[in-house]
Image (spheres, rainbow, N blue to C red):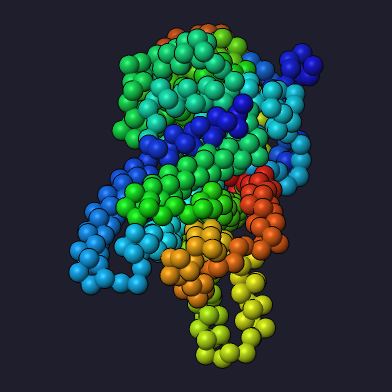
């Protein structure tokens, strides 16, 4: 099947390109560095807590710390996966057009739809696997050192992967319309713009206690245009312990109602929108690519 | 069946392509027959590459119809029977030559032992045997052309479209490619050759189309396109008034060389008139030392046609 041939080729290309190898090596180094840092931090904590005492037992304190480490490190995974998505796929179609490599592939007995879906599928597989590996690797390290494992880890991974696939949909569509560099810049600006909008909304709400409908509307529109930040908030919610465990661990929901984390799951309406987004944007890319002169 | 009882390999009718406001191809119509080598000639910007891209489905026409091997360009089964090599091709540099051919062979639907056999055969045909494991990123321009031709003929196509095949090759490589094309043609492959190398087109092609400013100016066998007078150089032992008079009656013009009066330049309508010139020399009692038609090359015809259309 020609579609799977393109998928295989995309996987092969990603693995053989130095960029992917560099990302894998850096990710492994990051993981090792994190293990060392976490071990040092826990040793310091254990030696201090035995000397000073505290309100929580050292074990519960470690568990509590595990929650924060989970959120911090999975946010890092979210950042790495998103950046890898942008770098790896901003030129999914435009890159081949610019290089002229499509000139010998498109005339072959394969439809342009199969080319786009095949490339999308190959990229999605790489990114899904990379994200899942990094996600579980950091969770496993934190569990090993602190004993904390989020009760809804698969839901957390699900929303994380959805965010990455949403970003992939956006880069796929963009690469069918604009040059690689332009596509990469647009998606990067949108990706960075979404959390900045969340931050602004948070700051304004702190300064002016009255709810601003305009700000709320702007945030909603931004989340519709690029739902990655909203999905990250969903991921952060699933990384938290169960509600019953909060007081035991000395935690409060206030600790997690921040511009970067949330104590609420992602709204169902947004999840439906994301599913639509992930499917429709590559379809728009297919329609555009079918009409594009090469 | 069409003209001469031959099946068409390519049928183009009323083809027009407009890029934004620029007309690249305008009302182009021609037929190329199966088993034929068809040359497509034109200066830069004439619209040659646009036509080739339309024939391969890379570009959609604004208007007009194109049929390749009897089907629209989008017909998947037809695409299995077509090979294409673009001008100055670029391939994925990280691939090894063998992997590159395997990928393209699989796109054509080849699998298993047949695919392996064809990969070896085409590598040998383009003189790249033993380079299977070499990365394309390390290939020279000429080697890129060769591996590009290898992928174009991997599926043993009925029709191969070649865009400036020899542009990156050294003289030896050019000779080898010409030989290969002759062999492929002899085996029955239809060849559409888009080229600036007029000598190649003249040597290989049964028919030629000349295109300029998006329009086809002439289509036909190279020798039939010569509708201009033929100049014959005649050298004799002596030139008499009778000889000049008799030659004047069959020729369009007769010029006597001022420095060498025994050398005449006789302008005749066609090759048959050349035989008349020889007979007249003999009848007038002169000894004929040489009679040499000045060969009109395709290049001359091409340049004259382009100049005339630009005027």
Closer-to-camera residue (B271/B238):
B271
Residue A265 image position (x, y, % from top left): 60, 63
Task: Report how many numbered discs are placed on residues in the image.
Answer: 0
Q: Residue at x 76, y 36 (%)?
A: B65
On-image quarter of the N terminus of chain A: top right
In this picture, residue A279 sits left or right of residue B205: right
Residue B31 image position (x, y, % from top left): 71, 27
- Up/down of B78 relative to A182, above or below: above
Residue A2 image position (x, y, % from top left): 60, 29
- Up/down of A129 relative to B221, above or below: below
Closer-to-camera residue (B67/B281):
B67
Q: Is residue A67 visible?
A: yes
Q: Residue at x 26, y 71 (%)?
A: A53
Residue A70 image position (x, y, % from top left): 41, 58
Q: Residue at x 70, y 56 (%)?
A: A272
On-image quarter of the C terminus of chain A: top right
- Up/down of B102 relative to A218, above or below: above
Q: Is residue B182 visible?
A: no
In this picture, residue B61 sits left or right of residue A78: right
Closer-to-camera residue (A218/A40):
A40
Residue A270, quarter of picture = bottom right
């Amino acid at each position: 099947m020609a579609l799977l041939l393109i998928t295989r080729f995309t996987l092969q290309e990603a693995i053989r390109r130095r960029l992917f190898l560099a990302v894998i090596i850096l990710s492994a180094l990051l993981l090792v560095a994190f293990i060392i840092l976490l071990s040092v931090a826990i040793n310091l904590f254990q030696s201090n807590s035995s000397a000073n005492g505290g309100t929580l037992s050292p074990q519960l304190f470690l568990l509590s710390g595990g929650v924060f480490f989970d959120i911090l490190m999975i946010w890092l995974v979210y950042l790495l996966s998103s950046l890898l998505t942008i770098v790896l796929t901003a030129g999914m179609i435009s890159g081949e057009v610019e290089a002229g490599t499509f000139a010998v592939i498109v005339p072959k007995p394969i439809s342009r739809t199969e080319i786009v879906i095949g490339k999308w599928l190959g990229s999605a597989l790489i990114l899904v696997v990379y994200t899942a590996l990094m996600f579980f690797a950091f969770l496993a390290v934190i569990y090993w050192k602190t004993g904390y494992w989020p009760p809804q880890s698969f839901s957390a991974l699900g929303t994380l992967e959805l965010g990455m696939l949403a970003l992939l949909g956006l880069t796929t569509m963009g690469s069918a319309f604009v040059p690689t560099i332009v596509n990469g810049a647009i998606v990067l600006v949108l990706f960075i713009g979404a959390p900045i909008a969340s931050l602004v909304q948070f700051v304004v709400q702190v300064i002016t206690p009255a709810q601003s409908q305009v700000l709320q509307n702007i945030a909603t529109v931004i989340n519709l245009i690029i739902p990655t930040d909203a999905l990250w908030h969903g991921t952060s919610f699933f990384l938290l312990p169960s509600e019953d465990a909060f007081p035991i661990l000395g935690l409060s929901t206030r600790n997690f109602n921040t511009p970067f984390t949330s104590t609420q799951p992602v709204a169902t309406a947004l999840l439906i929108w994301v599913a639509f987004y992930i499917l429709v944007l590559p379809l728009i890319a297919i329609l555009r690519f079918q009409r594009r002169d090469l | 069946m069409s003209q001469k009882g031959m099946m068409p390999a390519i049928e183009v009718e009323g083809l027009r392509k407009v890029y934004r406001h620029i007309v690249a191809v305008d009302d182009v119509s021609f037929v190329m027959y199966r088993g034929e080598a068809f040359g497509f000639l034109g200066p830069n910007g004439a619209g040659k590459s646009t036509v080739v891209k339309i024939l391969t489905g890379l570009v959609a026409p604004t208007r007009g119809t194109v049929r390749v091997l009897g089907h629209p360009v989008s017909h998947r089964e037809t695409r299995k029977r077509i090979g294409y090599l673009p001008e100055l091709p670029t391939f994925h540099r990280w691939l090894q030559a063998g992997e590159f051919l395997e990928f393209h062979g699989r796109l054509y639907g080849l699998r298993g032992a047949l695919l392996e056999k064809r990969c070896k055969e085409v590598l040998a045909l383009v003189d790249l045997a033993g380079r299977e494991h070499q990365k394309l990123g390390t290939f020279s321009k000429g080697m890129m052309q060769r591996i590009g031709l290898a992928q174009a003929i991997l599926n043993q196509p009925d029709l191969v479209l070649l865009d400036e095949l020899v542009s990156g090759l050294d003289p030896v490589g050019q000779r080898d490619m010409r030989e290969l094309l002759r062999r492929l043609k002899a085996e029955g492959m239809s060849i559409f050759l888009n080229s600036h190398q007029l000598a190649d087109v003249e040597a290989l092609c049964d028919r030629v189309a000349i295109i300029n400013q998006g329009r086809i100016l002439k289509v036909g066998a190279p020798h039939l396109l010569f509708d201009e007078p033929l100049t014959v150089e005649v050298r004799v032992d002596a030139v008499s008034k009778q000889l000049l008079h008799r030659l004047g009656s069959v020729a369009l013009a007769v010029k006597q060389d001022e420095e060498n009066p025994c050398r005449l330049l006789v302008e005749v309508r066609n090759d048959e008139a050349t035989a008349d010139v020889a007979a007249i020399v003999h009848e007038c009692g002169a000894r004929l030392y040489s009679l040499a038609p000045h060969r009109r090359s395709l290049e001359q015809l091409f340049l004259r046609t382009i100049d005339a259309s630009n005027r």
